[in-house]
Amino acid sequence: MADLSTEFLGIRSPNPFWLASAPPTDKEYNVRRAFEAGWGGVVWKTLGQDPAIVNVNGPRYGVVYGADRRVLGMNNIELITDRPLHVNLREIKVVKRDYPDRAMIVSLMVPCEEQAWAEILPLVEETGADGIELNFGCPHGMSERGMGSAVGQVPEYIEMVSRWCKQHTRMPVIVKLTPNITDIRHPARAAKAGGADAVSLINTVTSITSVDLDAMSPEPMIDGKGTHGGYCGPAVKPIALNMVAQIARDPETHGMPISGIGGVTTWRDAAEFLALGAGTVQVCTAAMTYGFKVIEEMTEGLSLWMDEKGYGSVAEVVGRAVPNVTDWQYLNLNYVTKARIDQEACIKCGRCFAACEDTSHQAISMSADRVFEVIDAECVACNLCVNVCPVENCITMEELAEGAVDTRTGAPVSSTHADWTTHPNNPAAVKAAE
C-alpha cells in the first residue's frame, strides 16, 4: 500500500486528512473520536480571548440540497468557540499527549493588537500543540468586530499580524485565507512577507442559502431574523481549487506550503487538491454529513489510487498538476475534438439534442426514430452534450488530427481559428513577430 504519511512544516501525521477548524473539533470528546476513526490531524476550533463568545441558541446551519437531498453546500452562522479558553487549552494538552503522532493545530482569533497575540500565544505553546492557524477568514459575526475576514481582506493587516506571531512563538504559523476577496494572491503574498510558514484556504464564502417565503427572512432564522453566513461543502470546491492553484503558480508564493480546504468529500477531491499544490487537506462538511468514519473511504481510496498510478508517497503527488495550469492565452487553438455518441449506450432521451439545438451550436441531428448524431461541421467541441447526458460515457470527445474528414459530409475538419503558431493570442508568435 502507498505511504500516506505526511510531513507539513515539519509536522508529521499518518495521512494528509485533517479536520478543519469547525464544530467537529470543538472539544476533546469529538477530537478523540476523530483520532480513533483514523484522521491524521485536526485544527482545533478557533480560540479567542475570555470572556467566551456567546453563540445563538437556534438554528445555525442552512443547506443547499441536490435533487436526491444530497448536501451540496452548507451555510453556517456559528461563531468561534463559546467554551472558556482555559478549558480548551487543557483539553488540547491532554489530547496531544495521548495522540503524539497526530497533527494538532490550534486556530486563533483575537483583536488586531500585538498585545492580544502576545498574551495568547504562550498559552497555546504550553499545550504542546504542533502549530497555529490564524483565522483571517470567518465572514460573519467576528468580521463585524474587526476580526476574521475583516483582517483577511487587508493584506497589510495579514503581514502585520503574521509578523507579530512569528516574533512571539516558536510554533509554525499557518494563515487561513478568506475567499471573499478579488485576488487571493495578494493576501498570500502578505502572509509570506510577514514570515508565515504556510497558508490554508479557502475559508467559507459569504452567503445566504435560502429565504423563508412565509416569514420573509433569510435562513437559518433566529426569532424571525436571519443573517449572512459562511458557505462550505462540495459546492465551493471549484473556487477552492482555483485559488490553491493561483497561489501555487504565483512566482512570489511558489513553494509556500498550502493546506487545501473546500468541499473535500472523497479521496478524489483530496487528490485534486494535492495535485494542485496542497500538502494536506482539511475536511469539515463531509464529516458533519457522514460522520468521522468517512475517513476510512478517503484513506483507502487515496492509497489504492496512488498504488495504481505508481506514487509511493503523498509528496510525489503534491504539485504534479501545477505545470499544466496555464493562462487562457497559452491554450492551443489548433487542438480539435468532436463529440461522439455511442448508439448502443444511448437511451434516446434527447437531452443532448435539446441542449445543443436551443442553447449551443445546432450540432446534433435527430432522426424520425430518435437516433441522435453529431454534425462535425457544426460541432465546436464545447462538450455541453457530454455534461447533460444522463448516461456516463455515452457521449465522449474524440481528438481529431488537423485535416481529418467529417464522416457525415466528407468535408475536412479544421480548427475554427488560424494557425496557432502565428495566432496573435500566442505569446510566442507575438514575440517572434517583434
Image (cartoon, rainbow, N blue to C red):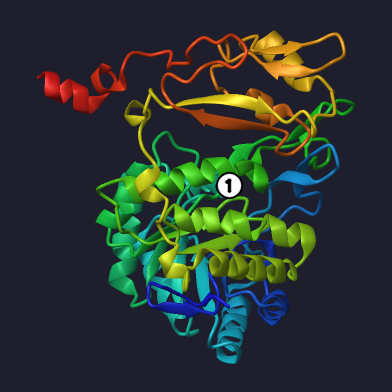
Query: Is 132 left, or right, of 42 in this rendering?
Result: left
Q: Could you tell whether 299 is left or right of 320 in the image? A: right
> How far across and how far down the image is residue 143, in percent?
53, 45
Q: In this view, does 433 lie above or below 112?
A: above
Residue 420 locus on image (x, y percent): 31, 21
Residue at point 42%, 27% (across, down): 335
Let me know if residue 63 appears in the view. Answer: yes
Task: From the top left corner, tell me how far across and down residue 104 is, in percent.
Answer: 53, 76
Residue at the outermost left position: 434
> Disc count in the image?
1
**Label 1: how many Cα within 10 Å (few below 14, some 14–19, many 20+):** many
156 or 75: which is nearer to us? 75
The residue at the far right in this view is 214
Viewer-proximal residue among 96 and 34:
34
Q: Please say if 258 is above or below 357.
A: below
Residue positioned 80% across, 18% down in the render? 371
Q: Which residue is drawn at 76% across and 18% down?
A: 372
Tell me where residue 178 appears, x and y as whole percent. Answer: 48, 46
Whether residue 383 is visible to the viewer of this picture, yes or no, is no
Q: In what quadrant of the picture does the N terminus appear?
A: bottom right
Q: Give me the residue at 74% from left, 37% from top.
A: 226
Q: Name the quadrant of the C terminus.
A: top left
Residue type at mark 1: give it: Thr
The residue pinned by badge 1 equals 204
428 to the left or right of 94: left
Which structural element holds mark 1?
loop
Given residues 111 and 209, the one toward you in this image is 209
Examine the image and state in which quarter residue 79 appears.
Answer: bottom right
